[in-house]
Image (spheres, grey):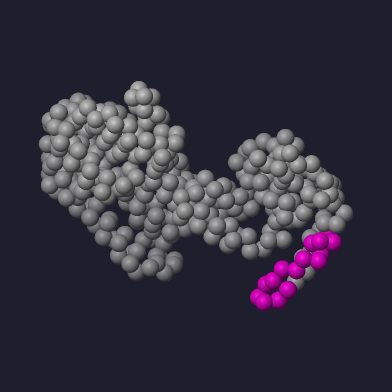
Amino acid sequence: MTSIVFLPVPPTLKEELLRSPFTQDGEAYPLEFQIDPEILLPLELDEEEAPLESTISLERILSGMLKVIAMDSQGIPLKEETPPHWIDYYRSFVLTVKPAIFNELSSASIVKAANGEYDMALEICQILLGLFPRSPGVLLNRALIMEQRAAGPEGDEGAQHAALGAYEEALSAEPVLSDTLFNAAFFYLRRRDYELARSCFTQYLLTGEDEDLPEDKKTEAERILKEMEEQGLEDQAYRDAYEAINQGDHETGLVRMRDFIERYPRVSNGWFLLGWALRMGGRYQDALEALQKAAELGDQSCDLSNEIAICQMELGNLKEARKELERALRKEGENIKIISNLGVLALKSGNTEEAQAFFRTILALDPHDSLAKHYLGDLS
């Protein structure tokens, strides 16, 4: 563990700054920074370390400043009061000493996310947001990382909600980036929130009036908007049904979804939502028939397989349920929801050892999964 200690300006610091050149366009320049002796400098130390002269270095001071800046950007209080002008001073200090820090940290966050180290990647993003408040590029990068985490083993409801909030913040940035609109559109599309997806794709295409958009992305956005229109996914009945079902009001969702299906009987999403609402209401046979209709119309999603499997389990068709879950698992091998239902299915089949293996797999992917802990506790 590390802690932050605030110290007066070390006598050698100004000399060290003036001795340390930085390179720009192939030429070395001396660093020039007006040291304010009235402002204490944060030093990051291991908790057992004493702030001796031998422990003080420019790198540790920079590390302390970055930590303080990140904490301030999140509203996290420090033991020592840090007035706003201190934060501004630390920010200027870091940017003077590390003029390339934006690219360095941005690259580091991308690498960490690619390796599945999401907490570290997001911590780096928070430092960048402290250095460059409300940076559109950083906000987009953070949203993409949260979306990656939500789609992976840590993709519980909390991760989904965090990703949603991150995209909302990225879309509120000034200016909103075209890449933010494009990525947010697909994020909402995967959530079946077609109204917001349509809005983002439409705004994305409008940015083409002011900047050159990649031709393949323009074509894809236009194709999806046309498909959404043809399938009636902007229909008010569909939006009302989705909202109602998502909030647990399956009865209202059923009424609005039947109205939609009467007008768009060949749209798989309508049958999926109908099946979802029926399953929530305990009408498993009717739900199964609606979900199978969605599959006939082209829906091959893991969500559909999972819903069908739940219905088959409730109807006692355990072999059919297993086929659906295994089909989904072949597509998404670390989908905790699918693995969890395989564990439940194993229990229903009387195979305790197999069930334990599935729940242990979940804990290997996410050590904090409460449902897996609950089942393993009951089985031990």
Work out whether residue 291 can be spotted.
yes
At which x and y percent is residue 152? Answer: 39, 46
At which x and y percent is residue 197? Answer: 34, 50
Picture quarter containing residue 225?
A: bottom left
Assign the C terminus to one quadrant of the image: top left
Assign the N terminus to one quadrant of the image: top right
At which x and y percent is residue 295? Answer: 16, 45
* Residue found 56% across the figure and 47% down from its top: 123
Q: Pick whichever, 102 or 330, lies toward us.
A: 330
Check if residue 17 falls in the magenta segment: yes
Q: Pick whichever, 148 or 344, lies toward us.
A: 344
Residue at the farthest bottom position: 26
Task: Tell whether 99 sits left or right of 325.
Answer: right
Check if residue 331 falls in the magenta segment: no
* Residue found 35% across the figure and 55% down from its top: 201
Instruction: Indicate whether 221 appears above or below 231.
Output: below
* Residue found 77% across the figure and 54% down from its top: 57
Q: What number of labels is visible?
A: 0
Work out whether residue 259 can be spotted.
no
At which x and y percent is residue 236? Answer: 25, 41
Task: Tell whether 251 sits left or right of 118.
Answer: left
Residue at the farthest right position: 11
Residue segment shown in magenta: 14-28
Task: Tell whether 129 sits left or right of 205.
Answer: right
Instruction: Indicate whether 220 appears above or below 255.
Output: below
Residue at the farthest top position: 378
Q: Pick whichever, 35 or 356, lies toward us.
A: 356
